[in-house]
Amino acid sequence: MVADSAGNPRRQWDIIDRILHRNSSIVLPSAVSLSSLASQFAAFFKEKISQLRLTLSANHVQSAHYPSPLASPPDFSVFLPATEDEIIKLISDCPNSLSSVVWMPHQLHCSSCHILAPVITRIVNLSLSTGQFCPELKQSVITPLL
């Protein structure tokens, strides 16, 4: 079975999952609201990282290959407002290949970024301060590197 699907890694993983009786249903924890679900995830991972740090700090010997952390990780509950300069830099640094994703051609948004920067900066800062994001920005596609 696995040999028959040699050119299709996805099919191979499906076969392996069936052989191992793995259930592929996605189960999310129950939550009253999306914000409480996000808070639960944040608390879970924050606790995991804290426990991992404690374990590592108790077991490590100081060396150049294992330097001690300079500061604790950020909380990500408060964001500094974006500046127009940051927005201009982000737009200018976008590769040409991104233009198929963006709603305007690369040359146009690079040449007019100084005009659009105040408006885009305002939108970004309002989104960060209110926690309101358009649905398209809440989705992503993650492609593993095999």
Image: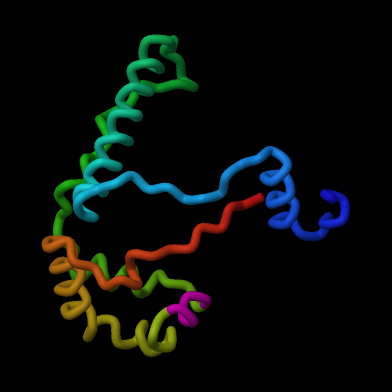
In terms of secondary structure, what is the magenta stretch mainly?
helix
Asked where in the image residue 111 lies, by quadrant, the reply is bottom left
Question: Is 30 included in the stretch rendered in magenta?
Answer: no
Residue at 76% across, 59% down: 8
Q: Position of residue 72 (x, y in %)?
A: 25, 30
Q: Position of residue 6 (x, y in %)?
A: 83, 55
Residue 10, relative to residue 123: is it above or below?
Answer: above
Read off the magenta span: 97-101
The image's colour scheme reads rainbow
Question: Is 98 included in the stretch rendered in magenta?
Answer: yes
Q: Is residue 118 left or right of residue 61?
A: left
Residue at 33% across, 17% down: 54
Residue 55, relative to residue 122: is it above or below?
Answer: above
Q: Which of the two residues, 62 or 4, is positioned nearer the viewer here? A: 4
Asked where in the image residue 143 lies, by quadrant, the reply is bottom right
Number of marks in the rendered image:
0
Q: Position of residue 13 (x, y in %)?
A: 70, 49
Q: Position of residue 37 (x, y in %)?
A: 25, 48
